[in-house]
Amino acid sequence: MPLVFAALLGFLLMLVATACGEPKPSGPEASLEQPMDKETVEALKQVAGERVFFGHQSVGGNILGGLESLLAASGTNWAVVDITAGQAPGGPALLHARIGENGTPTGKIDDFGRAIAKMTPAKPKFAFMKLCYVDVRSDADVAKLLDYYTKALTKLKSEHPDTTFGHVTVPLAPVLNRLQESRQAVHWRASQKGRRQRTTRRVQRAAAQGLPR
């Protein structure tokens, strides 16, 4: 795996470790507790010269917020662009989109492939997606899901030979009892419905203004 991609995945996986805790300020306005070392700054600047796609859902937003904080603190200029309801710009950028729905891992995997397929004119040099802890519950058939993911990624690699695909560990969560799981499931469904409605409104506004969707 190219060193630049390994560096990017390292940053993202480091951020996953804190993404599932208590909400913290994120984005460029968030401050870091300690100054960044020279090696980290240099690695960020190297990554910023690449075109990358990240497919995610809720925890992915926390990860991106943390990455934006690192970029701002290091003075690194790398566009972080949400293409969920729009087209991908050309050139170096961290393109990201919400894929599928929480609780339906195979749908996320399929949507990840569709998102890459419709990218024009340039495909990403590096691409990866992540599932969430809600996608792999205690009753999940992990072997079957892994087989589905492996076959899908093998197909994507053959379809997009110039793109390097990486793999991200599913974030962990505390063990919940059935009542807590039911309450969280209701919350996730409501948040997904609200997100779809907001995306639809953005697309409608863009269409009314004659902008790319």
Image (cartoon, grey):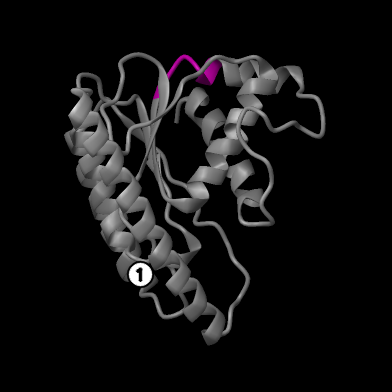
Point out the stretch of residues depicted in magenta: 46-51
- List the residue tagged with mark 1: 143
Is 60 on the left or on the right of 212, as rendered? right
Q: Is residue 70 positioned above or below 106 on the image? A: above
Q: Nearer the viewer, residue 36 or 32?
A: 32
Q: Nearer the viewer, residue 187 or 58?
A: 187
Q: Residue 3, position in %: x, y?
A: 52, 25
Asked if residue 50 is among those painted magenta in the image, a careful observer would answer: yes
Q: Residue 194, position in %: x, y?
A: 37, 56
Is 106 on the left or on the right of 191, as rendered? left
Q: Residues within 10 Å of mark 1 (few under 14, many from 20)?
A: few
Asked if residue 152 is among those painted magenta in the image, a careful observer would answer: no
Tell me the quarter of the image containing the N terminus.
top left
Picture residue at 61% right of the left edge, 50% below the top? 19
Q: Is residue 122 positioned above or below 20 on the image? A: above
Q: Residue 157, position in %: x, y?
A: 25, 38
In the displayed orientation, state which residue is furthest to the bottom.
Answer: 178
Picture residue at 50% right of the left edge, 72% below the top? 184
* Quarter where residue 45 is shown: top right
Q: Which amino acid does the dot numbered 1 rest on?
A: Ala
Picture residue at 35% right of the left edge, 75% below the top? 141
